[in-house]
Image (cartoon, rainbow, N blue to C red):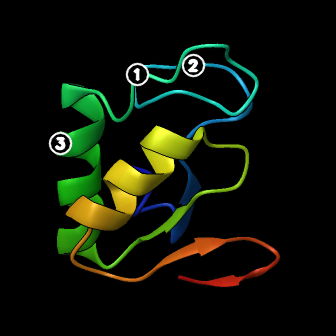
């Protein structure tokens, strides 16, 4: 749906944990969830960019390790 509306970059979390992964303000980082892995796979297939701003360290590393496409930490740089 978001892709059809023109969205091409998705911020995976914003400080707190969500259904995708853990944000940078959480005391425990559980990494990318199973749902998050499915979201990332779909984003890769569609050519959408995963924004790692405000994402926890383990979640960030999971996304970088599993993504088949480039990721970014907007507004800093591509990873």
Decide: few, some or many residues near mark 3? Use Cα within 10 Å; few <14, some 14-19, many ≥20: few
Mark 2 or 3, nearer chain start: 2
Viewer-proximal residue among 54 and 8: 54
**Residue 36: image x %, image y %?**
30, 36
**Residue 8: image x %, image y %?**
51, 72
> Under tag 1, what secondary structure?
loop
Quarter where residue 67 is shown: bottom left
Q: Is residue 34 positioned above or below 37 on the image?
A: above
Q: Are marks 1 and 2 in contact (CB under 8 Å)?
A: yes
Q: Is residue 52 positioned above or below 54 on the image?
A: below
Residue at the disc numbered 2: 17
- Kindly identify which numbered label has been placed on residue 18: none
Residue at the disc numbered 3: 38
In the picture provided, is 45 more to the left or to the right than 63? left
Foreground disc of the pair 1, 3: 1
Quarter where residue 44 is shown: bottom left
> Under tag 2, what secondary structure?
loop
> Under tag 3, what secondary structure?
helix
Residue at the disc numbered 1: 30
Viewer-proximal residue among 63 and 40: 63
């Amino acid at each position: 749906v978001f892709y059809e509306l023109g969205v091409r970059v998705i911020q995976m979390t914003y400080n707190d944990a969500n259904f995708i992964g853990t944000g940078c303000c959480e005391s425990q980082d559980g990494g990318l969830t199973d749902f998050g892995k499915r979201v990332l796979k779909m984003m890769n297939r569609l050519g959408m960019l995963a924004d790692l701003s405000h994402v926890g360290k383990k979640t960030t590393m999971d996304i970088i390790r599993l993504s088949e496409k480039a990721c970014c930490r907007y507004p800093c740089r591509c990873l």
